[in-house]
Image (cartoon, rainbow, N blue to C red):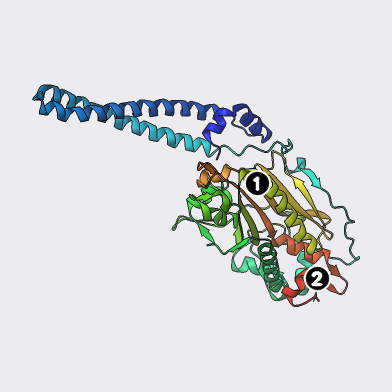
């Protein structure tokens, strides 16, 4: 959530940023500033009246002691009137703040200057292309959903039987591969300093609102109405909320956390080969990395996260490219996002497997997550996160790119976790 004083001091920058995002309601900025001006005037009037009322109340006792009963009673009546006015002003102030928050929650983050203009994913910029040759497969190569059937690795049909469409069931070496990838990613993340977190799989409204999932992505989240809880769309949500409401010392930064969770997303997929198999599902596993950073260091930290995710893909021997998302495709809360896509040799297309983002103060303003600077003043920290990595499409890429006529080869870095070097 943007800070009101930032909007007030940088109105043109905010409007230009919203234009880059193709935001359809820029008039909301003037509405916010009008409410803020009215709120400030109400607060000033309230403060003055409270001070006057306090002073008058103090003098009433003195008037009674001096025998000036009529004057004291007149003062008492004045105080009673003031109290009623104060009550009305407090209600007005509360309503203004509520109206202000409703408007602020509708405004997305302002994109970083480096974010390119564009309306959709078609306009995203290739930030780093794959420099090696793209893999070529043998003539009888298959897409991952056919390989899964051949080697009995996972079943979408059984998922439909047990739950519904988009809920795969993994079995045998397919289940072992899932578990191996989760352990591999967590070990690699903790090896460079991320603290492992195992969070709850359901969150309350305040937690989802804190990271920007609500109200923006309400339709994509599974909601448990009876308990007023949401199933996780990503581990980012609970892990970032670990420090919600906290004031950290500057020397405690950065906070680096990693967590594995199943992820649940209601988003409906279109039909066609590009969403077959594991390309788009309602439940998938993902390992996330999250950082809470000093504002001066957050973009250097973003570079480190991008480098780290690239290292993971290199170890899995998967060709990848990095995209810088355009204004029309960057998420509601993000200031700058890099997407990683792996190349699927069987499908002959790129598959997104990770998003790495800097949210600057957008999440921490909602979370009230601050740090105390060298002068003892509290400042909003920056938050960042990234997928390291999303398993469904990683599994698809591994099966397809590493298939041979003899079976599916397991990358060397993953073999200590699988316990086997081939699926055959």
For the point 75% across and 54% down, the residue is 307
Element assignment for label 2: helix
Residue 370's place in the image compared with 392, above or below, is above
Q: Is residue 303 above or below residue 195?
A: above
* Residue appearing at x 65%, y 61% in the figure: 193
Residue 329 % position (x, y): 69, 42
Indicate left or right for 227 with 118 as reference. Answer: left
Position above or below: 40 against 148 = above
Which residue is drawn at the image coordinates 51% and 35% (left, top)? Answer: 103
Foreground residue among 77 and 203: 77
Number of other residues with Cα within 10 Å of mark 1, as a class: few under 14, some 14 to 19, many 20 or more: many
Q: CA distance from mark 1 to mark 2?
A: 33 Å
Pointer 2 local density, CA inside 10 Å: few below 14, some 14–19, many at least 20: few
Q: Secondary structure at mark 1?
A: helix
Residue 26 in picture, x, y percent from top left:
59, 29
- Say which of 150 and 214 sits in front: 214
Q: Quadrant of the C terminus?
A: bottom right
Q: Quadrant of residue 400?
A: bottom right
Identity of the residue drawn at 57% across and 53% down: 252
What is the number of callouts on the image? Answer: 2
Task: Tell me which label, 1 or 2, sits earlier in the chain.
Answer: 1
Q: Kindly identify which residue carries mark 1.
A: 298
Look at the image and tell me whether residue 140 can be seen: yes
Residue 23 numbered tag = none
Q: Which residue is mark 2?
A: 412
> Do we see residue 27 in this rendering?
no
């Amino acid at each position: 959530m943007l800070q009101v004083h930032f909007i007030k001091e940088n109105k043109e920058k905010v409007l230009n940023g919203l234009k880059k995002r193709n935001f359809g309601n820029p008039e909301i900025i003037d509405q916010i500033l009008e409410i803020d001006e009215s709120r400030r005037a109400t607060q000033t009037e309230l403060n003055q009246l409270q001070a006057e009322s306090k002073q008058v109340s103090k003098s009433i006792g003195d008037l009674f002691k001096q025998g000036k009963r009529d004057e004291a009673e007149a003062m008492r009546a004045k105080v009673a009137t003031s109290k009623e006015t104060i009550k009305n002003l407090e209600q007005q102030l509360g309503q203004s703040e509520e109206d202000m928050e409703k408007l602020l929650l509708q405004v997305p983050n302002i994109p970083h200057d480096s974010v390119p203009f564009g309306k959709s994913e078609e306009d995203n910029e290739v930030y780093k292309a794959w420099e090696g040759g793209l893999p070529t497969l043998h003539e009888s190569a298959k897409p991952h959903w056919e390989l899964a059937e051949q080697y009995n690795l996972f079943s979408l049909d059984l998922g439909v039987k047990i739950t519904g469409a988009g809920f795969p069931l993994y079995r045998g070496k397919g289940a072992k591969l899932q578990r191996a990838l989760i352990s591999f990613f967590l070990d690699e993340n903790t090896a460079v300093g991320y603290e492992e977190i195992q969070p709850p799989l359901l969150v309350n409204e305040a937690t989802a609102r804190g990271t920007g999932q609500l109200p923006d992505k309400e339709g994509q989240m599974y909601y448990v109405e009876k308990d007023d809880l949401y199933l996780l769309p990503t581990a980012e949500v609970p892990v970032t909320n670990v420090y919600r409401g906290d004031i950290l010392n500057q020397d405690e930064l950065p906070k680096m956390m990693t967590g594995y969770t199943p992820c649940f997303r209601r988003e409906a997929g279109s039909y066609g080969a590009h969403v077959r198999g594991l390309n788009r599902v309602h439940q998938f596993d993902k390992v996330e990395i999250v950082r809470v950073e000093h504002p001066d260091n957050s973009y250097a930290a973003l570079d480190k996260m991008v480098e780290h995710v690239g290292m993971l893909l290199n170890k899995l021997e998967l060709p990848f490219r990095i995209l810088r998302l355009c204004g029309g495709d960057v998420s509601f809360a993000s200031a700058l996002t890099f997407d990683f896509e792996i190349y699927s040799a069987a499908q002959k297309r790129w598959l997104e497997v990770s998003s790495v983002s800097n949210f600057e103060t957008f999440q921490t303003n909602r979370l009230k997550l601050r740090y105390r600077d060298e002068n003892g003043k509290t400042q909003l920290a920056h938050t960042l996160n990234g997928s390291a990595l999303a398993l469904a499409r990683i599994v698809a890429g591994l099966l397809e790119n590493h298939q041979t006529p003899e079976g599916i080869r397991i990358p060397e870095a993953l073999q200590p976790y699988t316990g086997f070097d081939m699926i055959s």
